[in-house]
């Protein structure tokens, strides 16, 4: 605060203040009153003992603050909230809690240990939820709302809930993306509950894609149990750690909270089945194993009408000793409509070596020229390669009947031509 403002504030202790109709008077307990007063640009709180403190007004783009009286810390005594609009939808708050032992209001500062854990970095858009005895703070950034929830211990806040963003989209797991997790904590800061939610706050579910998927007590292979889920089982998503997903499944014996391996769930090798595809589709691939003419040609044909919105092409590598590796080659990036008896050419490009990498041409989402890696990191050797196509509209992944055999790395010359 500037020297002039300090002097002005001090002088107000000796000078009668102008009363404004919209400034609140508080009665935190019987016979005890306090009120907000104003002089010029200053807002002061007249404490029950007759002293005055200058109220800290949130920095925002509004001319006048709003004042609210509510029991923010659920201790049975009214407190004071000072808020200002920040942007189109956000409302930022400062809080003054009543301390009955001192019979005074005190500015509530969020502990530094909490600041880095908050989604909203302070008190925003406050809502009291009496049934939880929690104070919810909500803010909007871009298209999404975020929230934190506080509980109080003798007037001191601790983080009860927060919304965490996990931008760990993994293309090797087709169409699996849970960006929002609501975490619940105990007073010591330990996570006691977690769940994936959507932008409306509803719990997210996940459907088992594999014929049989074993459950684990911890996110590691060593903790595998005898229990398993089958394809089509629907689970609530609780948490994610890399290639592991924690789920809750409503079994006949009650809810089960376990971990599943995403590597196992989305193992396209395991899901391969020979024979006609249930959607009446077929996928054909060229023999691209000749380094002198490594043309990768991929064609799709249909017995009946079908539309694909988010098709992805995956390569499945396998060796004679059982080593297997899956590689997401690319997303088609456009809608594919197939008529009955129709066909569609997905790809007809050469594998090229550019800047030391083996790549294939595929336009990006903006239809700009781009090259994607054709091979993952493989141990040199001979591989059998099958191609798989995935899409949410498909009843099951679509595989090529052909299997290409090639040596890795192939002896493809460096291409110095521009696209």
Image (tube, grey):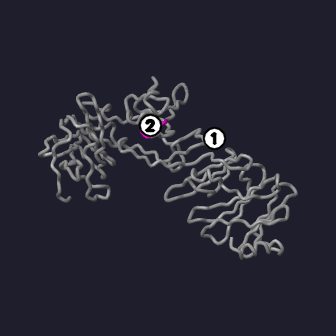
Residue 36: x %, y % from top left: 77, 66
| Picture coordinates of residue 9, whole percent (x, y) | 76, 72
Q: Residues within 10 Å of mark 2 (few under 14, many from 20)?
A: some
Nearest to the observer: residue 284 or residue 357: 357
- Dominant secondary structure, magenta: strand
Q: Is residue 192 visible?
A: yes
Magenta-span inclusion, residue 75: no
| Residue at x 76%, y 68% (from the top left corner) | 44
The C terminus: image quadrant: bottom left
**Relative vertical location of residue 118 with respect to residue 62 in this rendering, above or below:** above
The quarter of the displayed image where residue 298 is located = top left
Disc on res. 244: 2
- Residue marked by disc 1: 186
Please say if the residues under marks 2 and 1 sit with CB atoms less than 8 Å apart: no
Please name the residue shown 21% across and 35% down the image.
381
Residue 7 higher or lower than 280, as above or below: below
Which portion, as a residue range, is magenta?
242-246
Q: How many residues crowd around disc 1 within 10 Å: few (fewer than 14), some, or many (20 or more)?
A: some
Horizontal relation, residue 8 to residue 335: left or right? right
Q: Nearer the viewer, residue 302 or 121?
A: 121
Cα separation between marks 2 and 1: 24 Å
The numbered mark, 2 or 1, whose residue comes first in the sequence reads 1
Tell me where residue 373 appears, x and y as whole percent: 27, 48
């Amino acid at each position: 605060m500037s020297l002039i403002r300090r002097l002005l504030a001090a002088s107000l202790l000796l000078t009668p203040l102008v009363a404004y109709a919209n400034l609140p008077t508080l009665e935190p307990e019987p016979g005890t009153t306090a009120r907000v007063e104003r002089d010029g640009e200053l807002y002061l709180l007249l404490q029950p003992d007759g002293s005055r403190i200058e109220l800290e007004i949130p920095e925002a783009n509004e001319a006048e603050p709003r004042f609210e009286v509510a029991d923010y810390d659920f201790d049975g005594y009214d407190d004071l909230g000072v808020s200002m609009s920040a942007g189109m939808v956000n409302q930022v708050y400062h809080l003054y809690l009543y301390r009955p032992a001192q019979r005074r209001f005190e500015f509530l500062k969020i502990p530094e240990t909490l600041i880095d854990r908050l989604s909203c970095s302070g008190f925003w858009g406050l809502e009291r939820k009496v049934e939880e005895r929690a104070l919810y703070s909500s803010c909007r950034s871009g298209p999404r709302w975020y929230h934190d929830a506080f509980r109080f211990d003798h007037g001191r806040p601790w983080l009860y809930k927060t919304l965490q963003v996990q931008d760990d989209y993994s293309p090797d797991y087709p169409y699996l993306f849970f960006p929002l997790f609501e975490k619940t904590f105990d007073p010591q800061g330990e996570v006691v509950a977690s769940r994936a939610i959507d932008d409306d706050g509803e719990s997210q579910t996940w459907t088992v894609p594999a014929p049989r998927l074993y459950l684990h007590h911890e996110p590691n292979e060593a903790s595998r149990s005898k229990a398993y889920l089958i394809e089509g089982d629907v689970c609530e998503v609780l948490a994610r750690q890399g290639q592991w997903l924690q789920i809750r499944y409503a079994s006949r014996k009650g809810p089960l909270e376990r971990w599943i391996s995403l590597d196992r769930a989305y193992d396209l090798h395991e899901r391969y089945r020979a024979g006609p595809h249930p959607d009446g589709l077929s996928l054909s691939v060229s023999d691209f194993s000749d380094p002198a003419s490594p043309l990768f040609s991929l064609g799709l044909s249909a017995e009946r009408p079908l539309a694909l919105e988010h098709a992805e092409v995956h390569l499945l590598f396998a060796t004679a000793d059982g080593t297997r590796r899956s590689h997401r080659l690319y997303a088609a990036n456009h809608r594919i409509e197939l008529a009955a008896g129709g066909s569609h050419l997905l790809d007809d490009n050469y594998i090229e070596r550019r800047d030391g990498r083996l790549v294939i041409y595929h336009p990006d989402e903006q239809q700009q020229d781009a090259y994607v890696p054709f091979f993952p990191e493989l141990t040199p050797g001979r591989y059998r390669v099958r191609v798989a196509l995935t899409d949410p509209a498909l009843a099951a992944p679509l595989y090529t009947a052909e299997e290409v055999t090639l040596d890795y790395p192939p002896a493809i010359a460096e291409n110095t031509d521009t696209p």
